[in-house]
Image: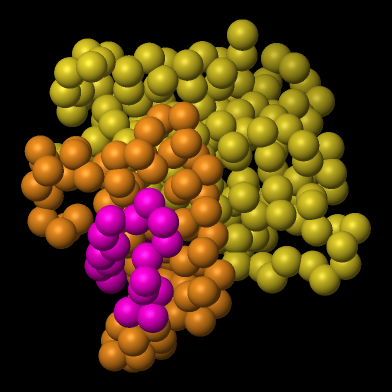
Amino acid sequence: MTLPRGVAQPTELIKRLNALQPFLSGVVNLRYTVDNDWSGDPALFFWITLSDEAARQAVLPQNSRRIMEFITQRLDPIGQWDLIPYFNFRSQSEQATLKEEVFG
Amino acid sequence: MAYHDDLIQHAVFLSELNLPHEPKQVDLRRAVSAAYYGFFHLLTTEAAQNWKHQGQRDRFARMFDHGRMKTCSSRVSSRPLPVDPAALPVATDMKLVADSFIKLQQARHTADYDNSKVWSRTQVWEMIAQTQDAMAAWSNIREEEIAQDYLLDLMGSR
């Protein structure tokens, strides 16, 4: 069984992920983990903290779509790294309360 | 109102419970699950509409398997978009449908089974918005050949 490129070449992947900076407007922090998804497929999970303004319910869909498209186009997780991308968003004030480590 | 629309409305209702105060995790988790099942039932109901015998359509809709639906959606999602500008809008909507199905299914699995995961309203609202976008995209393309092929392939037919 062939390892996904994102798992076999982690240094290269990290380099490309770091190149996503500077973050798009509205993004306060962006972290990621490589893991299997529920069915065992290799995946790249993004944990994205947004400013409270960018996470407002009225503008959240446009902002999240813009960020997901940017990352998908720049990184091409499936085509280039054999990893299914999954995106998780949270507001800055929510993260201040929840303090979940994966969001940083 | 169709069952899948009810499920989306229910997801929104659950996600907004207790506003402006902190949400309960149980409400957020059930909201994610409801959003996924809204989309799941939309697709399986659409596929069942193609079954000739109306009395058997509910049974037909129960034949779908989450794993096989993911495999099919992954195949569609990883296809490059066409160069032909005329084919691009339908292919883009098809890709959005397949991408969203994969992501919502993962979210639903986490929401239903992973008690270590903490959800926030923003996460859930984003999932609901993604479901609504995917449903709108499906509505645009549902009669297209590529969409009808997708419905058939969701059964794991190839």
Q: Nearer the viewer, residue A63 or A81?
A: A63
Image check: A84 left or right of A53?
A: right
Residues in magenta, as a range = A18-41
Image check: A44 left or right of B82?
A: left
**Is residue A24 part of the magenta span, yes or no?**
yes
Q: Nearer the viewer, residue A40 or A10?
A: A10
Q: Is residue B155 depicted above or below A81 in this figure?
A: above
Residue B136 screen position, x and y as percent:
66, 33
**Is residue B105 part of the magenta span, yes or no?**
no
Image check: A64 left or right of B64?
A: left
Q: Is residue B46 depicted above or below B78 in this figure?
A: above
Chain letter for orange, please.
A
Residue B29 screen position, x and y as percent:
27, 30
- Colour mapping used in the image: by chain
Q: Can the viewer see residue A81?
A: yes
Q: Can the viewer see residue B61?
A: no
Q: Which shade is chain B?
A: yellow
Quadrant of the image containing the C terminus of chain A: bottom left
Q: Nearer the viewer, residue A104 or B29?
A: A104
- Quadrant of res A33: bottom left
